[in-house]
Amino acid sequence: MTFVSMDNCSHNGDKLKHAIITIANEWLKKGFVEEGFIAYLKDEQRITFPISMIDKITPRPSAIVKEALTKQGIEGMEVIITSKNSYMAPFVNAEVSEYLVIEDKFTNGRPPLEEAGIIFTDRLTVNQVETMKVTTCLNPLHTALAVSGCLLSYTLISDEMKNETLRKFVEIIGYDEGIKVVVDPKIVNPKAFIDEVVKERLANPFIPDTPQRIATDTSQKVGIRFGETIKAYEKREDLNPSDLVAIPLAIATWCRYLLGVNDEGNKFEVSPDPLLDTLQEALKGVSIGNSTITGLESILSNEEIFGVNLYTVGLGKKIEEMFREMLLGPGAVMRTLKKYIG
C-alpha cells in the first residue's frame, strides 16, 4: 500500500509515516499488534509514504458562492464558523490554477494521474518545487499583501493588486529580490510561476481571498517566506542582504501590523497568531505619532522567528527606520511604501 498525504505542509509524507508508526508502537505496547506489524509498516517494499507539494489557493467559503448555489435551488449551503474561527461549508471555492507534485514512490502501481496534470517526480524535485513556491514565488508575496492589506483596510487580495504600489511591492519581492536566489526545480519555471501568480492568481477577482485570512500565524511563516531568502543572500559572495529593500519593508510592515492600528489610525482585529501576545507585549511602548520603537529589537534579533538575527546580516537598522517612518501619523504606512517602492 501507498499512503499519499495531501496536507499542505513540508515533508507531509514523513509526518504521516511518523504519526502512523507512533500509533502502531503504542498498539504494540498494549498487545493489540505483533512486532511483525511494525516491521511491515517500515518495509518500503510494501508500504510507502511519498511526500507531495500541493498548491491551490482555497479561500474561506464565500457568501457569493453560497448565494449562487442557493439561487439554483441547492439547499443546506450554510457557512459554519467554528469556535476556533475556522470556516467550513459543504462547498469549496478555489482558483483554477493548481499544482500537485508527488514523489513517485508507489509499491503496487498507481493510476495514470499524470494524464490529469499531476506531476510525478523524485523526492529532491518535490522538495525543490515546494522551496521555490514558499520561499520565493508565491508565499512571500502573499504575506506582504496580507499585512499591508490589513493596515490599508483592504478585504480582498485581488483589490490590493489594483493598487500600483502594492503590486510593485510584490513584483520586487518576487522578480527582483527572490529570483536571484530561487531554487529552480527545472520541471516548473520560477519566472513563469511568478508571472502566473502576479498576473492571474492574486489578481483574480473571482477568488474572494482576504488579507485577514493570510495574515494568520505570520510569526510561524516569516522565517520561511523571508528568512530563507535573506540567508541565501548571506551565503552568496556576489550578494549582500543589506541591499534588500522590499523584503525588509515587508518585515517592517508586519511589525507595524502587530500594533493593531490601521493607516487611518483606527483599531482593527489582528489575525490569530501563537506569538501574538508575546510580540504585542514587546511593542507595548510603541504608539502612532511617536517615533519611539522600544521593543522592536527583541523581535528583529529573534532567530527563532526569522531563522537569522536581522541585525547580524545588516538589516535590523534598516527595518527599524522603515518601521519608525510608518508610525508618523495617518497615511504614514502608504507614504513609507511609496518611498521605498517608488
Image (cartoon, rainbow, N blue to C red):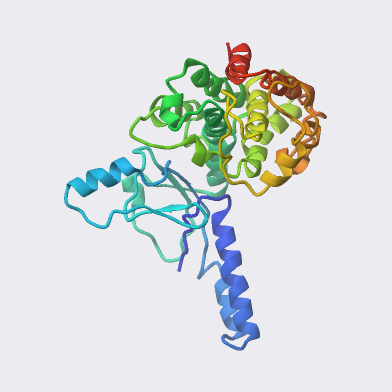
Q: Which of 246 and 183 is in front in this view?
A: 246
Q: In this view, does 103 lie above or below 46?
A: above
Task: Give coordinates of residue 240: x percent, y percent.
Answer: 74, 21
Q: Which of 188 and 157 is in front in this view?
A: 157
Q: In this view, does 169 lie above or below 87?
A: above
Task: Give coordinates of residue 113: x percent, y percent.
Answer: 35, 52
Q: In this view, does 291 lie to the left or right of 203?
A: right
Instruction: Tell me which residue sits at (45%, 36%) in the image.
Output: 210
Instruction: Tell me which residue sits at (46%, 65%) in the image.
Output: 2
Q: Nearer the viewer, residue 254 or 43?
A: 254
Task: Give coordinates of residue 156: x percent, y percent.
Answer: 43, 32
Answer whether residue 290 is visible to the viewer in this image: yes
Task: Give coordinates of residue 19: x percent, y percent.
Answer: 59, 67
Q: In this view, does 120 lie above or below 234?
A: below
Instruction: Tell me which residue sits at (56%, 35%) in the image.
Output: 268
Q: In this view, does 164 lie to the left or right of 286?
A: left
